[in-house]
């Protein structure tokens, strides 16, 4: 309508242009598989996660063997003995991960783990369970120098504005953009 790509100091750098369509269950499966692969790729760059094993191979390993695995958190329980029991899954299966309360730093990390999060686990196997020694997130490495600008810059991400539909509130949106500027 009357809006331009850029008004005042606000510059729109990307706008999702795909034609709306009905979504099927397969679309969501594809989305979550893509998300898993992207985060898995980041985790695999962590030094602590060398020699990653798939869940289905863990059951064939000897007890008390060191291992690392990447998985999606499927379940999280607080056990009667005061430990955390996570269930993680990859494309090959699922396995329980015990985080012992006697490892306070690790226990604090486990406290913040949420369902559907993709994490790396380093530990020792014992039958059909992993005794965790470390839980790793897909952190952005700080080893590279951060690029900075000479001036202070802010970014805002907006979505679901209904631009172009009869429900779009153009006057309110224009007032909002002026307020942001």
Image: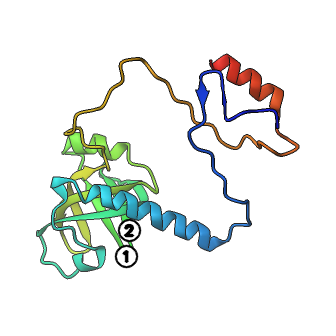
**Which quadrant of the figure contains the C terminus?**
top right
Badge 1 crowding class, 10 Å Cα cut-off, few under 14, some 14 to 19, many 20 or more, is few
Which residue: 46% across, 64% down?
34
Label 1, label 2: how far apart the Cα atoms are: 6 Å
Where in the figure is residue 19, as x and y percent of width and height?
A: 72, 60
**Which residue occupies the foreground of this view, 160 or 81?**
160
Where residue 110 sits in the image (x, y, percent)? 32, 47
172 in relation to 14, above or below = above
Corner quadrant of residue 63: bottom left
Residue linked to disc 1: 93
Question: Farthest bottom residue?
Answer: 60
Q: Secondary structure at mark 1?
A: strand
Tally of numbered discs: 2
Asked whether disc 1 touches disc 2, contact meaning CB atoms under 8 Å apart, the reply is yes
Q: Quadrant of residue 45?
A: bottom left
Element type at mark 2: strand
Coordinates of residue 23 in the picture (x, y in percent): 69, 67
The residue under the point 63% across, 20% down is 180
Going by the picture, which residue comes out furthest to the right? Answer: 166
Judge from the rendering whether residue 167 lies leftward or rightward of residue 38; answer left or right: right
The image quadrant of residue 47 is bottom left
Residue at (30, 31) in percent of width and height: 147
Camera-side residue: 156 or 87? 156
Is residue 90 rendered to the left or right of residue 5?
Answer: left
Residue 62 at what x, y percent from top left?
12, 77
Q: Which mark is residue 14?
A: none
Taking depth in this image into account, of 57 and 129 the one nearest to the observer is 57
Residue occupied by mark 2: 89
């Amino acid at each position: 309508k009357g809006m331009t790509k850029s008004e005042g100091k606000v510059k729109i750098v990307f706008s999702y242009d795909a034609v709306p369509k009905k979504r099927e269950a397969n679309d969501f499966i594809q989305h979550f598989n893509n998300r898993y692969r992207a985060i898995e790729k980041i985790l695999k760059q962590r030094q602590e996660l060398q020699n990653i094993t798939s869940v289905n191979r863990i059951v064939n390993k000897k007890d008390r063997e060191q291992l690392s695995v990447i998985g999606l958190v499927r379940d999280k329980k607080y056990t009667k003995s005061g430990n955390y029991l996570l269930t993680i899954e990859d494309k090959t299966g699922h396995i329980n991960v015990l985080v012992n309360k006697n490892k306070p730093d690790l226990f604090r990390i486990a406290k913040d783990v949420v369902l559907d999060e993709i994490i790396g686990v380093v530990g020792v196997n014992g039958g059909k369970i992993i005794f965790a020694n470390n839980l790793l997130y897909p952190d952005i490495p700080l080893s590279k120098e951060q690029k900075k600008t000479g001036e202070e810059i802010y970014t805002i991400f907006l979505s679901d504005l209904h631009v172009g539909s009869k429900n779009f509130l153009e006057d309110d949106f224009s007032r909002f953009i002026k307020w942001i500027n």
